[in-house]
Image (cartoon, coloured by chain):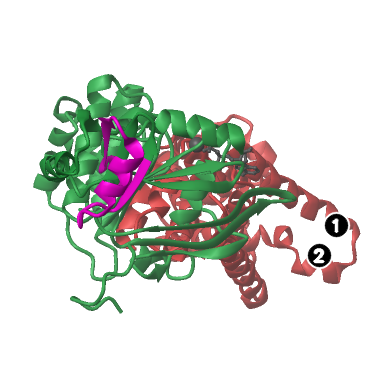
Chain colours: A red, B green
């Protein structure tokens, strides 16, 4: 299994779309941190480097990162089919389940990678503003950017780590969904489009009663900044991830390649 | 299951294979058996279903009905064990990761082969060895995207034989190859078969395949219309004589003659091999039959194929 996971990682890091996504995630915070109208838009003064990660994640997480995930994860199946390398893989004495499970592991790691790079870029961009104690909030803790008083560096770091961890986690269902569509459609463009269409369709369901909204994946894409009890949405997102993942595994098991 | 010394079970066994896509029946009730050491050539017109059959054989596609066993294990329900000793190329040209070099691609295949239950390691030396065998040493450290069509095809065969397979399945391994390349593939296949590997390959090179395949299956319109045992055919000798019928009945009495027939002015006999020819000649002259000429009765697979396909 490790062989396959390593192979998948090498292919992921070698793919142009993943490289592009990682560069964008790294550069975006640097641009935003120095944007002249940043504070007008934020409506609060940005006083500390600890606030930049939340700003970057807030921008990237709704549209950009889901797009990157949809395309690159769809490509993990689509490219293999179009370049014909999936068949040779399956001719070797490995279970189909192992093959697709390795892809799933790497697909789920991809959001972690993207969020990680975004946070690293943000922390670099925050250097001029400093990382000492400050009055205000990180944007990912109580009181969001306004905060609830003075934050020490350690508290701020903890909030940033918790927030980015949750951000990565809440993006995982999107990766699993993209893999599922990849297996069903065996084509990069179609699978990426289907993933994105599904997400947008869910967003459009805001016209439905709140009970329905509460079980929608897209209603929880702000988990990283949520300060109320997050157990329920967390469980829901994990169910989505596992569900889509298992569906991908089963769909792959008897698929003609 | 496969105890040593037990009666050899067929290396490849296909029973009642049916494959439909929607309402199109692509394969209809295909049966075939290939023993260890046997070379089975699959041929037939374009669109006959050869590639589909090979995809079902290797477990890439799932049949609508029927079953496929490799070394006694069902390839569709016990895939990883059934493929433990499989080497295969199912597409021409063979496909590899274009961003990795030839050696890296083979290393990946070696790692995957080692994942078999009870898997064997494939050493770096073995990778170099197969690259040399396929005359690819010069390309070993170049990215596959720089390979020519024929070089990719050779790399495909290299990856198929990498882990010393007991079952080798190749879909048109010689397409896109130069004449020397074709000869090379044929030599490799023959030597593997000699060492006990069962081989199925699909091909359109009938006259060449006839020189070393043991069995030829002719597939048209998804049906296996004929299976030709070339070993039996090649043991045929023809004698131009004054009395073919008399000669045939005389030859039939010899213990090593398996079958006789006549095709005036020839009497045709299936001898065990050419060692039987002098005895047959001596016997004919004892019987008072005058022999003007004796020669192997070459079976023309191409002509035979043409007739069969046109009939079907
Ligand atoms: N995935 C598929 N869906 C529908 N029809 C297919 C599919 N794959 C192959 N076929 C059909 O099966 C037939 C046999 O194709 P193939 O096995 O590639 O033939 P061959 O290799 O003998 O030239 C063709 O008529 C082809 O159109
Ligand atoms: Mg074909």
**Which mark, by number, is residue B264?**
none
In this figure, which residue is indicated by the disc labeled 2? A213
What is the C-alpha distance between the residues marked 1 and 2? 7 Å
Q: Position of residue B167 (x, y in %)?
A: 30, 55
Q: In the rendered structure, which segment of residues is drawn in magenta?
A: B232-261
Q: Position of residue B307 (x, y in %)?
A: 53, 32
Residue B254 part of the magenta-drawn span: yes
Q: Quadrant of residue B217?
A: top left
The residue sitting at 38% across, 38% down in the picture is B262
Under circle 1, the secondary element is helix
The residue sitting at 33% across, 36% down in the picture is B244
Under circle 2, the secondary element is helix
Q: Position of residue A219 (x, y in %)?
A: 74, 60
Q: Chain of mark 2?
A: A
Residue A166 part of the magenta-drawn span: no
Can residue B141 be seen here? The reply is no
Compared with B74, B297 (above or below) is: above
The residue sitting at 38% across, 28% down in the picture is B175
Question: Contact (CB < 8 A) between labels 1 and 2?
Answer: yes
In this figure, which residue is indicated by the disc labeled 1? A206
Compared with A237, B103 (above or below) is: above
């Amino acid at each position: 299994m490790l062989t396959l996971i390593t192979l998948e990682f090498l292919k992921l890091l070698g793919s142009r779309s993943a490289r592009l996504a990682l560069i964008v995630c790294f550069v975006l915070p640097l641009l935003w941190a120095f944007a002249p109208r940043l504070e007008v838009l934020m409506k609060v003064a940005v006083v500390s480097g600890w606030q930049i990660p939340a700003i970057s994640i807030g921008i990237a997480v709704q549209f950009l990162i889901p797009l990157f995930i949809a395309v690159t994860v769809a490509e993990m199946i689509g490219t293999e089919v179009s370049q014909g390398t999936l068949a040779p893989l399956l001719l070797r004495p490995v279970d189909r389940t192992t093959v697709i499970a390795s892809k799933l592991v790497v697909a789920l790691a991809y959001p972690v990678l993207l969020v990680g790079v975004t946070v690293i870029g943000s922390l670099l961009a925050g250097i001029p503003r400093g990382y000492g104690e400050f009055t205000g909030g990180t944007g990912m803790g109580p009181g969001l950017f306004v905060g609830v008083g003075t934050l020490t560096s350690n508290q701020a770091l903890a909030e940033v780590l918790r927030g980015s961890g949750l951000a990565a986690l809440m993006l995982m269902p999107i990766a699993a969904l993209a893999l599922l569509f990849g297996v069903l459609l065996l084509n990069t463009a179609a699978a990426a489009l289907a993933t994105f269409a599904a997400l947008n369709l869910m967003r459009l369901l805001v016209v439905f009663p709140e009970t329905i909204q509460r079980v929608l994946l897209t209603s929880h894409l702000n988990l990283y900044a949520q300060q109320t009890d997050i157990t329920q949405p967390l469980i829901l997102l994990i169910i989505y991830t596992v569900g889509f993942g298992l569906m991908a595994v089963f769909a792959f098991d008897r698929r003609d390649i | 299951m496969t105890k040593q010394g037990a009666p050899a079970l067929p290396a490849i066994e296909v029973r009642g294979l049916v494959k439909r896509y929607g309402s199109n029946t692509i394969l209809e009730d295909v049966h075939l058996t290939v023993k260890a050491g046997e070379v089975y050539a699959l041929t037939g017109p374009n669109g006959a279903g050869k590639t589909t059959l090979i995809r079902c054989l290797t477990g890439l596609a799932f049949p609508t009905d029927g079953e496929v066993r490799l070394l006694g294990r069902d390839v569709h329900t016990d895939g990883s064990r059934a493929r433990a000793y499989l080497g295969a190329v199912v597409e021409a040209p063979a496909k590899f990761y274009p961003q990795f070099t030839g050696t890296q691609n083979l290393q990946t295949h070696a790692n995957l082969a080692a994942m078999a239950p009870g898997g064997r390691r494939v050493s770096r030396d073995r990778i170099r060895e197969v690259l040399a065998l396929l005359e690819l040493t010069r390309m070993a450290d170049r990215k596959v995207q720089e390979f020519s069509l024929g070089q990719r095809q050779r790399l495909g065969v290299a990856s198929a034989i990498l882990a010393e397979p007991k079952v080798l399945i190749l879909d048109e391994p010689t397409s896109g190859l130069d004449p020397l390349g074709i000869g090379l593939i044929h030599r490799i296949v023959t030597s593997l078969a000699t060492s006990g590997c069962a081989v199925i390959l699909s091909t359109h090179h009938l006259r060449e395949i006839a020189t070393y395949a043991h069995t030829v299956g002719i597939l048209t319109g998804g049906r296996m219309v004929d299976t030709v045992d070339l070993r039996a055919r090649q043991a045929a000798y023809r004698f131009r004589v004054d009395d073919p019928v008399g000669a045939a009945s005389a030859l039939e009495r010899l213990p090593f003659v398996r079958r006789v027939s006549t095709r005036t002015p020839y009497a045709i006999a299936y001898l065990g091999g050419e060692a039987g020819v002098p005895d047959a000649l001596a016997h004919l002259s004892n019987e008072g039959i005058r022999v003007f000429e004796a020669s192997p009765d070459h079976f023309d697979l191409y002509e035979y194929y043409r007739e069969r396909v046109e009939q079907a």
